[in-house]
Amino acid sequence: MPGIVSVKTPSDSPPPRISLPDNSQAQTPRMDSSAPLPKPASPLPKKSSSASPSRSKFSPRKPPPESSNPDLSLDNPDLGPFLLKLARDTISSGEGPAKALDYALRASKSFERCAIDGEPSLDLAMSLHVLSAIYCSLGRFEEAVPVLERAIKVPEPARGPDHALAAFSGHMQLGDTYSMLGQVDRSIERYEQGLKIQIEALGETDPRVGETCRYLAEAQVQAMQFDKAEELCKKTLEIHRVHSEPASLEEAADRRLMALICEAKGDYESALEHLVLASMAMIANGQDNEVASVDLSIGNIYLSLCRFDEAVFSYQKALTVFKSSKGENHPYVASVYVRLADLYHKTGKLRESKSYCDNALRIYSKPVPGTTGEEIAGGLMEISAIYEMVGEPEEALKLLQRAMKLLEDKPGQQSTIAGIEARMGVMLYSIGQYEEARSSFESGVAKLRACGERKSAFFGVVLNQMGLACVQLFKIDKATELFEEARSILEQECGPYHQDTLGVYSNLAATYDAMGRVEDAIEILEYVLKLREEKLGIANPDFEDEKSRLAELLKEAGRDRNRKAKSLENLIDPSSSKRSKKEATKRWPGLGFKIRAE
């Protein structure tokens, strides 16, 4: 899946692409794997070739006679299969997708004309799959989407396995296309529909269903839907326990994904258990390089648990294997250097940390052939985080700019670029470059909206930070709009008691105060203090600050604190009075804005 390195996907694998559907067999969704896995069977039961949706009843070896009118020739039932075969052969021979595109377009038109009224044409569906795949190979993903949306409407899964296969393939291919456009939510919707069709055709426990469950789980990890991903991954493990040998490569891949999910949820002990079992399975199957990758992940877990000596041991094991099998200048080696740099920074050994950062940058500056831009960008982003932590934001910004440049032309990387721009905005804000910070946040927010991530907690945090930049530029109305949107998102995604949500409440109260909406500011602060007193405790240092701010506002309003805070649901009143800009800016130094973004 774009935007995340799968636990099955080696970081030096080529970027994902949509392959042309095969004549004899639909392709089950899988991540590429460096481990030699058994070739998956078709996701649906086998059938006779005469009923196959991807094979025409006609297999002409010679072109049918051409009519003097090209449009009339499309009515020839022999033409569609012939043009579809030409499109495939053109792609296979490397003649270029432009000619194949023309053949596929004409084939789909011919199949549509020759279709029997009221009868869904599986040949039409397959030609549309091929056409969309060619569009994707040309980077024209937006044009592939309507073609696939049309293709999934052609088959009727209730008619039998042939139709179910065509519908399943269409939904999965459409999901991949949405993923390449960075529209993760839409992508997941298509995968879920494809899985539903596959389960209805094959049953809950078919091994091919397990492969699709894992594929969908990886997409949900990318979308940070960890609970749903965990549920699917457990289902995949159960299916593979039934159909695979103990300690199989399939089980190892499932456990690595499960470890990734557990780590994201903060359950490090469970993640460690899954990684150890995965390592044992890899050792049993002689997968030395994969064992080293698992050792690297185990080191990360030990680092999160502050078990630094064990983390160093795991990293050094991985480093030794990667150096001997990949070479001294391989990106895998650089990735271990980055992890060691992070470890030594956390243990206060800054000289060693800087040395490992330099070693990693040396490798990324002169990458070996076959290294992908995404891989280098990921390493640069990790190193920039270390530079940021040691107080070198200018150097960190340079690394992020290099990373963003590497990803600019890569499909499916808009969310990643938006994340980079958000980080750049935070750094620019920290060094006082507020206008540049606002521009960086604005660009990131626009990309996140376009990718369909406008309801994620991360999006809410970015809106909060952009609002803070607007505050520094005295764009208070814009800041208020951003804080209000961030509040609604974080309340939904994180709940009212989360630190990010509380930070937005505090910032919103400050902007209301600056705008002269004192009553609204008081009501928010009363609500926040009520939450802290009743649910979170008053030990947090922000409590005293918010309490003193509330006391000042109450004194100005000439009343006492209302202990029964109202709900925030109907708080914002567009008709509330506003001060002039001159009056609003008098109180800026003491407004106490809260920065909660990480």
Image: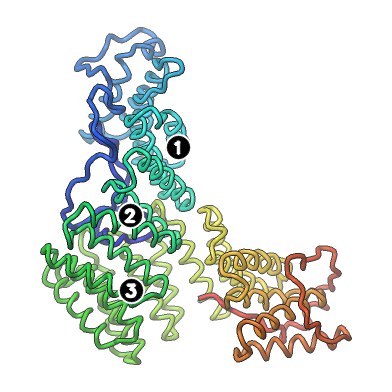
Q: How many marks?
A: 3
Q: Residue at point 44% right, 74% down?
A: 397
Compute the Cα span from label 3 to label 1.
Answer: 44 Å
Local crowd size for mark 1, using a 10 Å CA cut-off: few (<14), some (14–19), many (≥20): few
Q: Quadrant of residue 344?
A: bottom left
Residue 338 in the image, given as x and y percentages of width and height: 30, 77
* Amino acid at dot 1: Glu
Disc number placed over residue 214 in the picture, else none: 2
* Amino acid at dot 3: Ser
The reply to whether callout 1 and callout 2 are in contact (CB within 8 Å) is: no
Q: Residue at point 45% right, 78% down?
A: 394
Mark closer to the chain start, 1 or 2? 1
Mark closer to the chain start, 3 or 1? 1
User: Dot 2: what SS?
Assistant: helix
Side of 76 where 193 appears, left or right: right
Local crowd size for mark 3, using a 10 Å CA cut-off: few (<14), some (14–19), many (≥20): some
Q: Residue at point 49% right, 66% down?
A: 421
Residue 266 in the image, given as x and y percentages of width and height: 41, 75
Side of 273 where 197 appears, left or right: right
Mark closer to the chain start, 2 or 3? 2
Q: Quadrant of residue 309?
A: bottom left
Compute the Cα span from label 1 to label 2.
Answer: 28 Å
* Amino acid at dot 2: Arg
The residue to which callout 3 is attached is 270
The residue to which callout 1 is attached is 143
